[in-house]
Image (tube, rainbow, N blue to C red):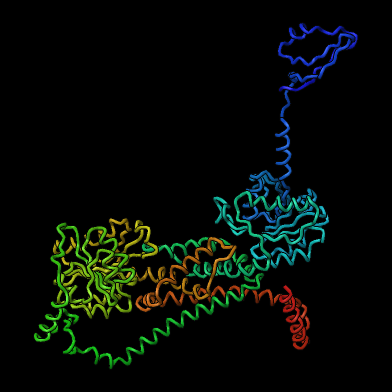
Amino acid sequence: MLGVSTFHSPSPSLKPPSHSTITRLNPKLPLSFSISPNSNRFSTAKPLIIRAIDAAQSFDYESKAALQFQNAQKLKIAIIGFGNFGQFLAATFVRQGHTVLAHSRSDYSAVAQSLGVKFFPNADDLCEEHPEVILLCTSIISTHNVLLSLPFQRLKRSTLIVDVLSVKEFPKSLLLELLPNDFDIICSHPMFGPESASRSWSGLPFVYEKVRIGDEEHRVARSEKFLDVFGREGCRMVEMSCADHDRYAAGSQFITHTVGRVLDMLLLESTPINTKGYESLLNLVQNTSGDSFDLYYGLFMFNKNSLEMLERLDLAFEDLRKQLFARLHHVVRSQLFENVGKVQNLQDSNNYAVAKYGQNGSAIVLSSNNQRSADAKLHGYYKSNGSFLSDDSTKLKIAIIGFGNFGQFLAKTFVRQGHKVLAYSRTDYSDVAQDLGVSYFNDADDLCEQHPEVILLCTSILSTEKVLKSLPVQRLKRNTLFVDVLSVKEFPRNIFLQHLPPYFDVLCTHPMFGPESGKNGWKGLPFLFDKVRVGKVESRMSRCDRFLDIFSKEGCRMVEMSCAEHDWHAAGSQFVTHTTGRVLEKLKLEATPIDTKGYETLLSLVENTAGDSFDLYYGLFLYNINAMEQLQRFDLAFESLKKQLFDRLHGIYRKQVFQNEENIRDFPERSMLPEISEDSSAVSSFTDTVDAK
């Protein structure tokens, strides 16, 4: 390393060097000397010269300063409660270079050693190490007892105490009550755990409140250093009061865990026809079922807002059931008093003639005069532009009956694949059809006279039978393929077989996606089908396969399954998914600053199901014979969960009220009157305690 030094003047007793000598010694030396002829002395400006330092230092100044700063950011953190969550946090603390100590009732010394943590079986020994931060990672229920057992007198008086509980007002009150006044307090809640943050904490919310921090600079700096542990990992740092946290958490975290536990009781399983919504529920069950019931009970017991949310959830479910049963009651009444409807269903000679078929396929003969009159009106209404048959034998002429959102959604793909698409609907969608390249018909007779190879019913479940009966099927070719895309399958299968002549082919399908879930492509999405009745002629079998190939080409996961099996699976997946979404919709859930991944799943579920009409949901209930059983199981699961919560609460209440029960039994002759009096005072005391908290 090079250093800088000054050029010192020679001793006065020495003869000053000549100018030539100086130049010869160092030709590049600046000539800044002035020599006086009347003096033996000379003056100099002491110019700088460079010389080498004998030995280089091991670290330069900047490295030393950086190392000192880095060490200053490290903390000595003691984790009280070294279970799964404590170990989960410790791994990150150690990786960041902090010194980590641990204490727990169970012996985790081997786990601690593998993590680089020093484990203390005795709390006194740990506290005598004077950790800067005490991190409470205990369960909600045991927090009070753990705090009472800690030897605070062995800690430094300014120690920072931090909790990571899922509720916040309860530990805040507890810490302020039990800790000495000179201890600092931070109440925090990492809104994640070993499962949801197994890869990274980036973007996950970390909520905190600086409840009490001393004014001294080192105490303020220490609290910031602790919070920076999570900030450095990319957490979304949310500073919020404990009261606000609990208000938000009751509407998000408690609801999430409640729904997850209810669904867990239904023993939901993956099916061959999983929708994205159902898969999100399966993931929710997996994430919540891994937590202990004590954690869930703590969310209920120690958050004063949770009981209100449980009551709102109960009322929402009751309201949904009333809607379903009120609609069902209306249907039953309509069937009981349908005499007027039967009269109206008789064929009116002034209306268009429509062929009627019995269950045996025999046609009811219509009046030839009425038929000719109807034909004349039809021919005058629509003029054909020519044959719609494609030269490509693989292409189909598909008529979509019911050209709403789902019909238009399917038509786009049909047209893109080169198929000829016709459409008919009660509402005029001619402009939309023209934009899509679809031939639109305002009259069903005109459409049927084009002899489409496939009739695709895209109507609602409730209107399917009525629409099918209204179609002039006598104008179709006798081997036309009828296809439905309803969310239930046994119902359309039965009405097809009941109302269509036996020479028509029948294919029941269910694309397990829609305009929202399939907007980015159909690849991997399930498409279920049942070849209910397809003629054994090669051309008819080929036509059925060509229709199915439309979905196969788009990458759908093709699932051949009977209609009965579909409805059994769908009741346990699709109906439960829609029921859950509609119950939550009634709660008017909103995004919060502390949303967990599970709560975001529920919000997405509500958004997806709320977009569907109630008629669709009601159809899933009314026309699937398995749906009623699933609704009852959902009800029983919810009731069972509530019973678990209130039984636990009742147990705590009884323990407080009858804490001297054994003493009372020693005096049976005095048990009645004093017991009543003591009960009354105990109840009053317990109520006051709960209200105070």
From the viewer's perspective, is 54 left or right of 445? right
Res 437 visible:
yes
Q: Of residues 315 and 572, which is closer to you in this image?
A: 315
In terms of image quadrants, where is residue 106? Answer: bottom right
Total numbered badges shown on the rendered structure? 0
Res 54 visible:
no
Q: Position of residue 582 (x, y in %)?
A: 46, 74
From the viewer's perspective, is 639 left or right of 651? left
In terms of image quadrants, where is residue 664? Answer: bottom right
From the viewer's perspective, is 428 left or right of 12? left
Q: Of residues 460 and 364, which is closer to you in this image?
A: 460
From the viewer's perspective, is 278 left or right of 212? left
Q: Is residue 243 above or below residue 335?
A: above
Q: Position of residue 27 (x, y in %)?
A: 71, 11
Image quadrant holding the N terminus, namely top right
Q: Position of residue 528 (x, y in %)?
A: 31, 64
In terms of image quadrants, where is residue 296? Answer: bottom right
Image quadrant holding the C terminus, namely bottom right
Q: Position of residue 225 (x, y in %)?
A: 71, 50
Q: Of residues 82 and 252, which is closer to you in this image?
A: 252
